[in-house]
Image: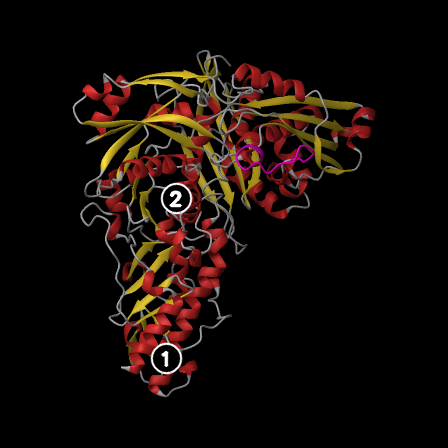
Amino acid sequence: MSNNIQRRDFLKSLGLAGIGLGIGIDGFSKTSSLVKVKPAFFSLEINPFIIIDNTGKITLVNSRPDMGQGSTQAVPSLLAEELEVSLDQVTIIQSDGRSKYGSQLSGGSSSVRGLWMPLRKAGAAARELLIKAAAETWKAPASECYAEAGKIIHKPSGKSLGYGQLADLAATFEIPKNPKLKDPKDFKILGKYNARLDVPDRVSGKAVYGIDVEIPGMVYAKMVHSPKIHETIVSIDDTEAKKVKGVLQVMKSERAMPHTRSEAVAVVASNYWAALKGAKALKVEWKAGTSTLNQNSADYFAKMYEEAKKPGINHEEKGDFDAVYHAGEKKLEAIYETPFLAHAPIEPENATVHVKEDGSVEIWAPVQGPDGTLAEVSGYLNIPADKIKVNVTLLGGAFGRKAYLDFVLEACDISKKINKPVKLIWSREDDISQGPYRPAMLSKMQGVLGKNGSPQALHHQAVGESILGQVFQGLQPTQADPWLGEELSQENHKYGFPVHKMSYSRVKTTIPIVWWRSVYASNFGWGQECFIDEMAHQAGKNPLAFRLDLLRDAPRFKGVLQMLAEKSNWNEKLPEGKAKGLAIFRSFDSISAACVFVSKKDQSVKIDKVISVIDCGMFVNPDNVKAQTEGNIVMGLSAAIKGGITFENETCVQSNFHDYLILRNNEMPEIETYAVINEEKPGGVGEPGLPPIAPALGNAIFALTGKRIRKLPLNLDEV
């Protein structure tokens, strides 16, 4: 009995007693709903991502929500590789936001590259503990024991013990701080193709997303927001709304954004259809609230172009660019423009929240970070974080939007007021017309060429609103945005200009913004890579050769371009009426390049083929790399040729997929993707493939038509 008490105390000290609700592979299925994972009492918990009970059950914790990038298996694969188990031997649960799991944000292509070493060490530590337990049991040297398929095997005798049989004893040892990791040449999972065990439920419709959650006694809510986003309420006429069968209540609410709050109305009903109909029948009179600034597209762009005429705030400068530019014989200057863009995930924003009478809160939602959700809800409701339980469901797309938690806080506000669990669902119109958006930006590019077209100097002045400044209010008036600066630094792009400058001019707007897939790289890859092509053309050099010369001291960049040249037959001359263009960009510690093939079709330009090459260092599953790169091509082309978000009369013009277009299946060109194989540290995969797509297309159109287009989106029918 005393031994049991000691083990109980040990488990409590590790925090295992409070593991609570977890969603495993089965738990993401509608057939099993949201199930509780209850480890056996005597369990081994490590770091704390691995739980092994004495029945032999192994549970691995995924600390990064899955929004389509495959983290439910990519992250646990890091553990399974070192633990010597296959993924079909384990249950996978989602972390719940508690601090012991560290950062739990899916974003910035950070999951695998951030967890590659920590989780491998956790798996290796568990393996060493289990080997030590087996060695002690057999009174044999640990060097004679090895792990394989969930068992420890004694090499001389062939005896074996399952992990479950060793869990009790292993739990009494001190966790090793520097366990020995496997040599990459011995990997069985990492870098290999492994079937995604979660895919069948997703393609069959059994998978549970946030929008599928059902809680006993819950009601539904639909928000009514001001078309102008920041207005306040003068009056609410709910006469017609309350006539809708199923409508239970109409109340004043709010939309709490990270940097501001705006008033809103909530329609609560017994079902979502009634809530939606009630919201449409509601009559709300609005008036201007907080002052708006540059909230019409025309005003914002006019202000940006005005600021582009002035010097920006320097982020970095090597040499005296202005002196070289003024003295230069062959100078180039151009401004490249990118629009606001909506994220438009297939699953719109939604959250199910129960603010209970005892002061506790439970949340079921498709959020990109349970830890961020825990912190924001705690601050918003002014309750301790330990009274909040966050259950992360699958996300039907996000692209950065579902790390902006206004929709969760709206559900919290409603549930607190009605004392019931409430399921809030944003409509597609809410999603597109309310933001937040990718910011619209300008790239003012300046360059100098020397004798024989040699590249002498480059200046990239970024102009537009700052995510750090608006969302986090963390940018001083005299400061260049460091996030943006790092993206455009010479250290990042590696182009070896003798003189280099990067500056920033902030133009504020009250149009809400936030990160969008590949963040600033999606804006500024367009300007940088089209301008490098412009310089190559003015120098009379092949765009590939021009880049390779600039990147002569950057072997990984050169390797990506050389692979792209090989796969695209770059030096092969194309028939009349066909052309190709290329671009390369580094983001999230990965280097990606693309070649786009185009042709003339009547008076239009047709995109025939896209070839993409990525060097992301070591990776988990080549199929995931391919899938994410293909997704980046689709999204990159959509951003390049479909209309953006525009504001008139301080109101978003677009409202749904009929006027905010995305690429359709019948518009897709042929695509090929390739990954460079090496043993470099892992980089991102979910976003780096996107930035080169638009500039490669722009450069291909120039090669085809001789027209240099500097404004996105491109109209292929009018080129």
Q: Would you name the residue on which mark 1 appears?
A: 133
Q: Magenta part of the protein: which range?
A: 469-480
Element type at marker 1? Answer: helix
Characterize the local packing of mark 2: few (<14), some (14-19) or many (20 or more) Cα atoms within 10 angstroms: many
- Specify whether 101 is left or right of 422: right
Task: Tell me which secondary structure the magenta stretch mostly adopts.
Answer: loop
Mark positioned earlier in the residue sequence (1 or 2): 2
> Relative to the observer, which residue lies in front, 442 or 35?
35
Does the magenta run of residues contain 12? no
Q: In which quarter of the image is residue 281?
A: top left
Above or below, 407 against 511 in this view is below
Above or below, 569 against 606 in this view is below
The disc at residue 69 is 2
- Specify whether 135 is left or right of 108: left
Q: Residue furthest left?
A: 245
> Relative to the observer, which residue lies in front, 588 or 288?
288
Quarter containing the N terminus: bottom left
Q: In which quarter of the image is residue 282?
A: top left
Element type at marker 2? Answer: loop
